[in-house]
Image (cartoon, grey):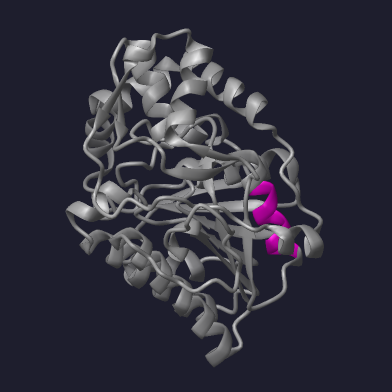
Amino acid sequence: MRIMVTGGLGFIGSQMVRWLLDNEPDVDIINVDALTYAGNPANVADYADNSRYQWIHASIADRAQMEPCFADKPIDAVINFAAESHVDRSIQSGVPFVATNVLGTQILLELARTYHVPRFLHVSTDEVYGSLGPNGLFRETSPLQPNSPYAASKAAADLLVLAAARTYQQDVVITRCSNNYGPYQFPEKLIPLFVTNGIEGQPWPLYGDGRNVRDWLHVEDHVRAIWAVLNSGKSGQIYNIGGHTEKSNWEIAEDLRAILGLPASVIVPVPDRLGHDRRYAMDAQKITKELGWEPRIAWEDGIASTVAWYQQHEDWWRPLKTGAYREYYRQQYGESGTTRAPSASR
């Protein structure tokens, strides 16, 4: 089975690549990644010489770059992780988010139809649903009410995927996940930022009153769910993936502070970001009932192992925080998405 994973050098995409290579010996992977700010070849460096793995440096928003990836050899499935995904960056400028998340998804859908790819899985987010009050859960039938440019671009991409199913009878599925955590997460995200700042003796900037709530899911549980949906999900359907672990940002900070043995003074409130959704929580009954998936990693175990990973892998995250990594790969490959790198393995 030959699978195209887009965005496979990012946090979740790279975990999908690693998991497949470790657990599915009949799967070959073509990893297409534009190497934007959160894409990092170090995430899969230990697999670079694997004969079942190939990386191509290309942007999903550039059809000329993408078409050879489809035309080279038949592809059995596309898993589309590729996205501009940081909400704060989308508030500064939504243009890159529309280019990658909307245009890029449409280009992938069209190429998948042209080259007769049997299945297309689009990875989305709980943020397309907007913000919940203190009660209730997001279900697959909940209305789309995105509140940030990032979330709006993902909602638009979701609609394009569903339109492809209705208009062309294209075999597509959508997953919408809650907040992920785990190793290899870019250190401007909440958990790795706090952990690495704690190691460096730096403060933890906490938005607003810190009471914004998210449902947390370990990345390994997420990629298992994606594999289940890719193989057994019903065509044209949406599947919510949640960790059943609601935590406020303040609670996250307190849990991390306890693990790291830091004083309360490390937490420094900062002005809230624009359009900050108050609460997300997912109803994942559908994927459990239809596909038998459930999260396996308890929060207490997952967060402890995640902290330990960052403590043990300073060589991975320190270059990301200094900018040395970006400069090195800019020199190696040029600006993101403008050149096609050679295969990492073949």
Quadrant of residue 203 within the rendered picture:
top left
Provide residue 311's location: percent of width, then percent of height: 48, 14
- The relative height of residue 42 versus residue 124 in the rendered view (above or below) is above
Q: Residue at x 59, y 83 (%)?
A: 170
Q: Main secondary structure of the magenta part?
A: helix
Q: Residue at x 63, y 45 (%)?
A: 243
- The relative height of residue 222 versus residue 161 in the rendered view (above or below) is above
Q: Is residue 283 visible?
A: yes
Q: Which of the two residues, 136 or 194, is positioned nearer the viewer here?
A: 136
Q: Which of the two residues, 48 or 187, is positioned nearer the viewer here?
A: 187
Total of numbered circles in the picture?
0
Q: Is residue 60 visible?
A: no
- The relative height of residue 109 versus residue 61 in the rendered view (above or below) is below
Provide residue 10's location: percent of width, then percent of height: 44, 44
Residue, far left: 92
Magenta residue check for 230: yes
Q: Residue at x 49, y 29 (%)?
A: 251
Magenta residue check for 121: no
Provide residue 39's location: percent of width, then percent of height: 38, 42
Where's the N terminus, which quadrant?
bottom right
Q: Which of the two residues, 80 or 208, is positioned nearer the viewer here?
A: 208
Tell whether 186 sits left or right of 89. Answer: right
Magenta residue span? 223-231
Residue, far bottom: 167
Provide residue 57's location: percent of width, then percent of height: 37, 51
- The relative height of residue 16 versus residue 104 in the rendered view (above or below) is above
Tell whether 63 sits left or right of 280. Answer: left
Q: Residue at x 63, y 78 (%)?
A: 236
Residue, far front: 134
